[in-house]
Image (cartoon, grey):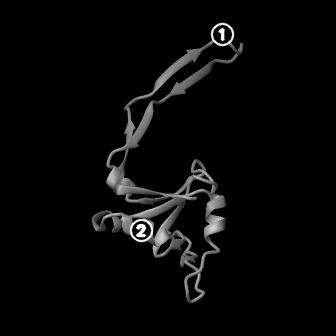
Amino acid sequence: MLFDLVYALRAAYRQNAGFVMSRRTQSAIRKFKDAQGNYLWHPPLTADRSATLIGFPVTEAEAMPEIAANSLSVAFGDFRRGYLVVDRTGLRVLRDPYSAKPYVLFYVTKRVGGGVQDFDAIKVLKFA
């Protein structure tokens, strides 16, 4: 099933692709083995590298759902090409001298957003 996910992505996107999943999903997938009994998961070789799954880096994202029936728990793709982060320039500052006398409170907000830009660059694995 993981190999099907990898090869569902076009070759141009596979070059910079990686897996994204939650911590509990990683825990379950770390136990997967191939036909020869070798683990598909490999720990990082150095401290500045990430672990690999079938030769692709793995990123932990707690926002991803855990493995359950009909869950989309594993994403694979080139997220730099597939996802666009929109970051508005500037900050909005609100000065509040009244709420916490004798202190002055500052509320700072920044608007950011994002969304999928190229649906061909990211594939998701659905568990049955």
Q: Is residue 77 left or right of residue 65?
A: left
User: As displayed, is residue 118 above or below residue 39?
Assistant: above
The number of numbered badges drawn on the structure is 2
Residue flagged by tag 2: what amino acid is it?
Val
Task: Tell me which residue sits at (43%, 36%) in the image.
Answer: 113
Q: Quadrant of residue 77?
A: bottom left
Sort mark 2 into few (<14), some (14-19) or many (20+) by Cα contacts within 10 Å: many
Q: Which residue is mark 1?
A: 98
What is the x, y in percent for residue 97? Answer: 62, 12
Label 1 and label 2: CA atoms lie apart by 57 Å
Q: Which residue is mark 2?
A: 6
In the rendered image, the residue lying farthest to the front is 128
Task: Tell me which residue sits at (44%, 34%) in the image.
Answer: 112
Comes first in the chain, label 1 or label 2: 2
User: As displayed, is residue 86 above or below residue 80?
Assistant: above
For this rendering, which residue is in front, 49 or 70?
A: 70
Task: Tell me which residue sits at (59%, 80%) in the image.
Answer: 33
Q: Quadrant of residue 21?
A: bottom right
Q: Is residue 112 left or right of residue 100?
A: left
What is the x, y in percent for residue 64? Answer: 57, 51
What is the x, y in percent for residue 63? Answer: 58, 47
Task: Tell me which residue sits at (43%, 69%) in the image.
Answer: 4
User: As displayed, is residue 84 above or below residue 25?
Assistant: above
Q: Quick one: quadrant of the C terminus?
A: bottom right
What SS does tag 1 mark?
A: loop
